[in-house]
Amino acid sequence: ERILQLIDSAESGKGLSSVPAEIGVVYDRLEAAIPDDPHIQRVLRRERRMAEMLTQRGFIKSDVMQKLSMDTRTMDECADFLVRFVAIRDVPAPELEASIQAFVDEVLTWCKAHGDLMSLYLSVVPGWATPAVRSVVMRMVMLEYRDPHQRDVIKRLLEGLNDLVDEGHFAVPPHIDSPLPVTEIGPVEPGSLSNQQAGALK
C-alpha cells in the first residue's frame, strides 16, 4: 500500500516521498513562516526525515493524517515554539535550567489546552500507550539531534507528554504490540548502533 502511494505521489508530480500530504503541508507552512533562519530550516528538515522514517515503518497512519489541520493562530504558536526550541542551544549556562523548564512547561500547557489536536496527533502513532513504542519513537527522535540542550528539551517534553497520557488528558489508542522489533534498537549515543541497525533506521 505504501509503495502504491509513493508511485501515485511521484506520478502526480509531488515527488517521491512517503510523508502524507497533510504532514507536508504543515512543514511547508512552518518553513514559509520562518524562511530566513538556517538553523530552523535544518530542524524542519530533520523533522521531515523523522516523519518519513516513521511513515515508512508503519508508525504513522496516513488515514488519520487526513484529519489533521491547524488554523493560522495554532500554526503561528507552533512556529514560535520552534524558534524558541532552536534558540535554546545558545542560552547562557546560568539561565539554562530555568529556560528549559519554562519552555517545557509552556509547551505541555499548550498541549493540554489543545486536547483534541493532541489526541489526533497521538493516534497517528499506533500504540502510543505502549511504553516500548514510546521508547522507539524517542530513540528515533534523538538520532536527529546532537545538541545536548535540545536533547534535554525533547526528553523532558516526551516524558511530560507521556505523563499527561497516563493521567488521561488525551484519548489515545489502547496498548498494542509494537510494529518494530524494539529489542533490536539500542542506545543512540554516537557509535552505539550496529551497522545493521543504522542501515535499518536510514
Image (spheres, rainbow, N blue to C red):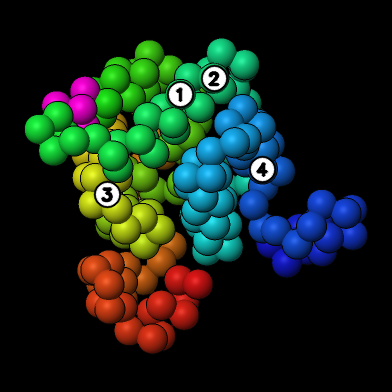
* Disc ID at residue 76: 2
The magenta region covers 97-102
The CA distance from mark 1 to mark 4 is 19 Å
Does the magenta run of residues contain 134?
no
Q: Are marks 1 and 2 in contact (CB under 8 Å)?
A: yes
* Disc ID at residue 44: none
Q: Which residue is mark 1?
A: 80
Residue in the image at 40% along x and 58% along y: 144
Residue in the image at 70% along x and 58% along y: 17
Q: Are marks 3 and 1 in contact (CB under 8 Å)?
A: no
Q: Is residue 29 above or below residue 134?
A: above
Residue 38: where, in percent of width, then height? 53, 45
Q: Which residue is mark 3?
A: 151
Q: Between residues 52 and 68, which one lies in front from this camera angle?
A: 52
Viewer-side label of 3, 4: 3
Residue in the image at 67% along x and 58% along y: 18
Q: Earlier in the sequence, mark 3 or mark 2?
A: 2
Label 1 Cα neighbours within 10 Å, binned few <14 / some 14-19 / many ≥20: some
